[in-house]
């Protein structure tokens, strides 16, 4: 890989340990993937924030980098293993909280914004069309590439962090236009009505597209919440973190429709629900907010929960970023939701919090949430926000 004089100096250690280590990571990656050079990035989003996933070795690595490392571009964090303020309420142990706080302190010393969310585009980390990024979280990467038209590979935690210290990333993969060409046409003939249908659609396309770049036609209308749900699902279940949706993705009209065509019929959506949903009726955890809730989704939860009470033996988590929760506070939604006995889970989510063994069953709007919760040995049900609120209030899945 061709380095500039300045980059070579950084690799030789002229700017300290964190920069040198980062250059070692980026040049190694660049060599592996055949990058010719580094390219400037507009922002970074770092995954690998939960102490649950990092452990002591990860914490030690971060502390070493934090000794002299300072980020050069806007950098935000993926969800952590707990709500950084109300962790006790969510049943997190003091021992875990202590370690998680050390992780967060290390990131803060690096100059990173402690905005632990998988929807950075809702809180000020909003890329431009064509902008190069180094983002990590799969749903956010897919959203950036496919809804915003930015360009990012799906970075690992260390490579994203390295890009933050350098302000650059190796130019390969989805940074290059020749690798962003759609290679399968997906005609959607199914009716997609409620939020969870978008998760089911993502499942169906992800399974059929198998690591290809879909060019999707047949979508009549879609909103931001539906797109973030679809992005999370389609990449979890198999597609590349880039799709073109006619009428949605900027630049889709410049791409030729691929010859290979598949269709998505109503039976594919039904099959997706059948595969994602387990045979379970009692619900111990309800979680809305995967990806993290927008203010619109929180407003809907508040409207549905008003005057009701979450059933005994069931917990209801509303996962969101702290910034969006502050809007909910101002609008009075928080008060309504908490009065019903539901809890906000800011800064965290059901996939990265240490939940294994705590809950046996989950109801959620999210296909991705079901995928990861099964790894935590939970039985899962996926449905609309209405169905999730109903299951929280009754303690059962009633659909
Ligand atoms: Fe976000 Fe966690 Fe879902 S990172 S996309 S809420 S699994």
Image: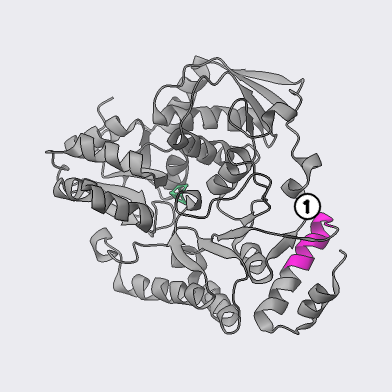
Q: Quadrant of the C terminus?
A: top left
Q: Is residue 274 above or below residue 331?
A: above
Number of other residues with Cα within 10 Å of mark 1, as a class: few under 14, some 14 to 19, many 20 or more: many
Query: Is residue 28 rendered magenta in the image?
Result: yes
Percent of width and height locating residue 370: 43, 40
The dominant secondary structure in magenta is helix
Q: Is residue 283 above or below residue 100?
A: above
Magenta segment boundaries in residue numbering: 26-35
- Residue most toward the right? 2
Percent of width and height locating residue 252: 68, 30
Q: Residue at x 11, y 38 (%)?
A: 307
Q: Residue at x 76, y 35 (%)?
A: 181
Q: Nearer the viewer, residue 369 or 107?
A: 107
Number of numbered callouts drawn: 1
Q: Quadrant of the N terminus?
A: bottom right
Which quadrant would residue 195 be assigned to in this image? top left
Query: Is residue 102 rendered magenta in the image?
Result: no
Q: Nearer the viewer, residue 193 or 202?
A: 193
């Amino acid at each position: 890989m061709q380095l500039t004089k300045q980059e070579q100096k950084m690799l030789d250690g002229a700017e300290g340990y964190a920069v040198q280590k980062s250059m070692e990571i980026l040049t190694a990656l660049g060599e592996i993937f055949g990058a010719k050079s580094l390219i400037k990035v507009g922002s970074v989003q770092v995954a690998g924030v939960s102490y649950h996933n990092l452990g002591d070795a990860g914490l030690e690595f971060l502390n070493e980098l934090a000794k002299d490392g300072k980020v050069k571009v806007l950098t935000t964090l993926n969800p952590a293993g707990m709500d950084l303020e109300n962790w006790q309420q969510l049943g997190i142990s003091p021992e875990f909280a202590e370690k998680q706080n050390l992780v967060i302190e290390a990131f803060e010393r690096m100059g990173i914004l402690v905005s632990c969310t998988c929807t950075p585009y809702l809180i000020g980390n909003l890329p431009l069309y064509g902008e190069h990024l180094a983002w990590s979280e799969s749903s956010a990467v897919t959203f950036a590439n496919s809804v915003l038209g930015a360009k990012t590979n799906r970075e690992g935690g260390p490579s994203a962090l390295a890009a933050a210290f350098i302000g650059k990333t190796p130019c390969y993969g989805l940074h290059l236009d020749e690798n962003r060409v759609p290679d399968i046409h997906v005609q959607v003939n199914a009716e997609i009505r409620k939020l969870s249908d978008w998760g089911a659609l993502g499942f169906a396309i992800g399974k059929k597209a198998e690591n290809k770049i879909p060019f999707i036609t047949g979508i009549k209308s879609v909103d931001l919440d539906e797109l973030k749900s679809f992005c999370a699902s389609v990449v979890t279940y198999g597609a590349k973190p880039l799709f073109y949706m006619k009428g949605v993705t900027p630049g889709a009209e410049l791409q030729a429709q691929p010859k290979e065509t598949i269709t998505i019929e109503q039976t594919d959506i039904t099959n997706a629900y059948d595969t994602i949903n387990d045979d379970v009726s009692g619900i111990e955890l309800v979680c809305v907010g995967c990806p993290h809730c927008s203010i619109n989704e929180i407003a809907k939860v508040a409207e549905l929960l008003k005057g009701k009470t979450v059933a005994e033996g069931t917990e209801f988590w509303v996962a969101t970023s702290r910034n969006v929760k502050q809007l909910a506070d101002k609008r009075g939604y928080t008060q309504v939701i908490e009065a019903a006995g539901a809890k906000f889970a800011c800064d965290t989510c059901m996939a990265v919090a240490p939940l294994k063994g705590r809950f046996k069953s989950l109801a959620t709007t999210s296909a991705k949430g079901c995928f990861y919760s099964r790894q935590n040995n939970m039985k899962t049900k996926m449905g609309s926000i209405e169905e999730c609120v109903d299951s929280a209030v009754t303690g059962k899945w009633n659909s």
